[in-house]
Amino acid sequence: MADSKPLISGNWKMHHNHFEAIRTIQRLAYNLSSADHDAV
């Protein structure tokens, strides 16, 4: 069995305005390397 990677999901639009949601996603993307996750 292959090593599993964390699944990150969220509904940021429920807790931020669109500027805050963009900032949250940009910070997340900056802090993740391609080895940390699979894009789905």
Image (cartoon, helix red, strand yellow):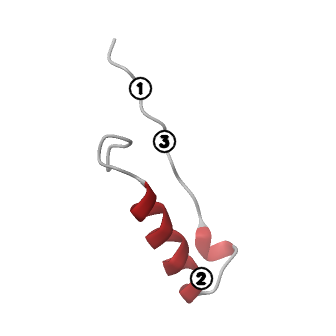
Circle 2: element type: helix
Residue 40's tag is none
Tell us which disc is closer to us: 3 or 2.
2
Amino acid type at mark 2: Glu
Against 6, residue 40 (above or below) is below
Number of numbered discs visible in the structure rendering: 3
Q: Counting residues from the N terminus, which is met first, the one under dot 3 or under dot 2?
A: 3
Q: Nearer the viewer, residue 8 or 34?
A: 34
Q: Residue furthest right?
A: 15
For the residues labelled 3 and 2, the Cα–Cα distance comes to: 22 Å
Which residue corresponds to mark 3? 7
Amino acid type at mark 3: Leu
- In percent of width and height, residue 27 lies at 49, 68
- In percent of width and height, residue 18 lies at 55, 86
Q: Quadrant of the N terminus?
A: top left
Q: Residue furthest top?
A: 1
Residue 4's tag is 1
Amino acid type at mark 1: Ser
Circle 1: element type: loop
Residue 20's tag is 2
- x 41%, y 26%: residue: 4
